[in-house]
Amino acid sequence: MFEWILIGIAVIILIMFIYYYNRLVSLSNQIDNSLSQIDVQLKKRSDLVPNLLSSVKGYMKHEKSVITEVTNARKALLGAQSFESKVKAGNQLESALKSIFAIAENYPQLRASETFMQLQQELTSIEDKIAYSRQFYNDGILSYNNACTTFPGKIFASIYGRKEKQFLKIEAEERVVPKVSF
């Protein structure tokens, strides 16, 4: 009888090892997938920028600094290697695009342009997808960190060498609403 109890305890422990290993791996994979989705949306946004700039250039001849800012931000995004630098460059591009849309208010013909309106709608849609992807990433981090810091997950996380991961944060300077002066 005692042998069956020991066998039962061993089986339960083995099942727990397998369960927590698989849980930590699947949560980590979900986080990697979330990062990939953010990267995809950032790339889609940067691919739309040349079309936006070509539709805007004819109208905004006196706004070359804004166009240059958008172009430089896009180059930084395309050249970014690490995820953190991609997020930072993506935020710079978002800020620069907001400046273009704010300045576009002074150009009624541009606002009425079907191409400009379509590009603006596509960019708005992509911004929404980026925000959703960031939220999904942070939700994945929350689930992973909870699994790594609660009992008995903390024990298994340390056995498997898993550590808490950092949330995607917005830097303080990126939280400031960009000022646009005319």
Image (cartoon, helix red, strand yellow):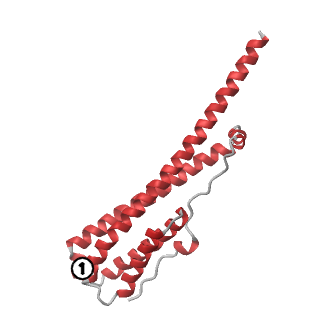
Location of residue 78 in the rendering, given as x and y in whole percent from the top left corner: 43, 68
> In this image, 165 relative to 83: left or right?
right
Task: Give x and y (percent) for residue 167.
Answer: 59, 57
- Classify 91 as above or below 144: below
Pointer 1 local density, CA inside 10 Å: few below 14, some 14–19, many at least 20: some
Residue in the image at 46% along x and 82% along y = 179
On-image quarter of the N terminus: top right
Residue appearing at x 31%, y 77% in the figure: 53
- Residue 140 point in image, percent of width and height: 54, 49
Q: Nearer the viewer, residue 181 or 33?
A: 33
174 vs 50, left or right, is right
In the image, residue 77 sits, relative to residue 129, either above or below, namely below
Horizontally, residue 172 falls left or right of residue 127, namely right
The secondary element bearing badge 1 is classed as: helix
In the rendered view of the protein, which quadrant contains the C terminus?
bottom left
Seen as rendered, the residue at the extreme right is 2
**Within the image, what quadrant is residue 123 found in?**
bottom left
Identify the residue at image location x=34%, y=66%. Answer: 47
Locate residue 54, reporting x and y percent: 27, 77
Query: Which of these two is toward me, 102 or 115?
Result: 115
Kind of residue sitting beneath label 1: Leu
Picture quarter containing residue 5? top right
From the image, tell me which residue sits under label 1. 110
**131 displayed left or right of 113:** right
Residue 8 lies, with reference to residue 24, above or below; the image says above
Q: Residue at x 58, y 72 (%)?
A: 172
Front residue of 91 and 85: 85
